[in-house]
Image (spheres, rainbow, N blue to C red):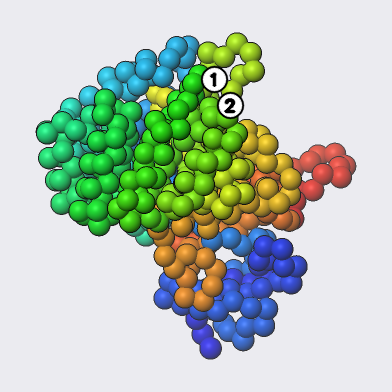
Amino acid sequence: MIVDLVVRNVRLGKFDQLQQIAVQAGKIAACGSLLDLTGVSEVDAGGRLILPGFIDSHVHLDIALVNDMRISGRQKPYTSQKEMMADMEARKKVFTKEDIMLRAETLLDMAVRHGVTALRAQCHIDPEVGLRHLEALLEVKQRVASRLTLQIVAFPNQELLREDTLSLFENAFAMGADVMGCAPLHDVDRRRHIDVAMDMAAKYQVDLDVHADLALLQVAEVDELDVVILARKILATGFQGRVCAGHVSALDSLPQSEAMQVIDLIREANISVISLPDLYRLGRADTQHVRRGLTRVKEMLQAGVNVCFASNNTRDCLRPYGNMNPLEEALILSYGAHMDEVGQLETLIEMTTTNAARAIGLTSYGLNPGDNADFILLAASSLSAAIINQSEVSHVFKAGQLLVENQRTCIWHVPTHYPTMIL
């Protein structure tokens, strides 16, 4: 039998026996060690690992890459989050549609190059910029559809509760926004902000994506945490399974016993939590016992909460880092969350694949027959080695089409025991 594509000699997770993957009409048709199939196109994986494509579940796409790409790093000292936000707001006023599209497509190409096949993008909507950013990203979404699945979050970067802001969001969903955003810190009445955002998500039958508890607190009260208010609202309205909460940094400000009570509530409300690389901005004022600014990743995973991680900001006014490489973000999180055991490193891979797919509601995701043929090949001997070695994503496939081939070359001119490619 002839199919569109056969990828031979791949390794699935911990299985040592080499497998074959067959693709037909953009879907995985078969997977096994003894497939009597011929591909119109064939790729020999040479023993590489195969994974479903990486997913970046939280990226501020419209403000990405505003920094000078030739001179990396922060151009002036970090003073406060408030000042960085003010800098961003000032720059945002002069963005053009063409500028946003160019930076967004560049960032998405960076992501695809590193094996990302789906991404959820935050898009600023407020009375100052109107719907200009959304218009740009909707056009980008069409242009990159064959390379990457893009979801667009209508993100309230200023007060949501203003009448002129609410009307913008009504128009945003008429235009084609995919997800309702929520950022309670931007309104004085945080509870009403969450209520209005969830009501709008329910009205348009879309998921809700929340920026929750972004700060570290000296004294944290359980009932005042965004994620607690959010969870109770979800349980009261039956909106379980359709909500992501990003950051959730203040959870680390609670005593252990109270934090576990909150984690139980998060699990009951079926909130997916997205850990973001907040180490760069939080704890800067601490002069001893410097806090890391991360949410309680390991405790939530152990409690059965769906946890993933994402890039958040990339080379913009807030975070000067980022290459849109999930293996790089996994390594950063492994340091910050003390996840260095083999099993924990394997969990980090799950967090940027299956956990992230669940968080953003992707269907037909995986490596089983009938799933979308969005997968990558990794030049690594194991999942944990992929993170430790920062292994190359050698091949990226979308709907069975080979998009990218990457090669890492090391040429020694003297005898060495160092392998040119670690498999």
Look at label 2 and name its amino acid. Answer: Arg
In the drawing, does residue 333 fall left or right of residue 237?
right
Query: Which of 397 and 257 lies nearest the eye of the viewer?
Result: 257
Q: Residue 145: which quarter of the image?
A: bottom left
Query: Which of 311 and 113 lies nearest the eye of the viewer?
Result: 311
Circle nearer the N terminus (1, 2) = 1
Q: Are marks 1 and 2 in contact (CB under 8 Å)?
A: yes
Identify the residue at image location x=59%, y=36%.
257
The answer to whether 417 is drawn above or below residue 240 in the figure is above
Residue 143 circle label: none
Q: Residue 298: which quarter of the image?
A: top right
Identify the residue at image location x=12%, y=34%.
163
Residue 292 circle label: 2
How dense is the environment of label 1, judged by Cα within 10 Å: few (below 14), some, or many (20 and up)? some
Q: Can see residue 326?
A: no
Look at label 1 and name its amino acid. Answer: Gly
Identify the residue at image location x=79%, y=41%.
412
Residue 240: percent from left, percent from top: 38, 55
Residue 283 circle label: 1
The answer to whether 110 is drawn above or below residue 82 in the figure is below
In the drawing, does residue 226 fall left or right of residue 137?
right
Please, what secondary structure does the residue beneath circle 2 have?
Answer: loop
Give the CA distance from mark 1 to mark 2.
6 Å
In which quadrant of the rendered image does the C terminus lie?
A: bottom right
Q: Can see residue 195?
A: yes
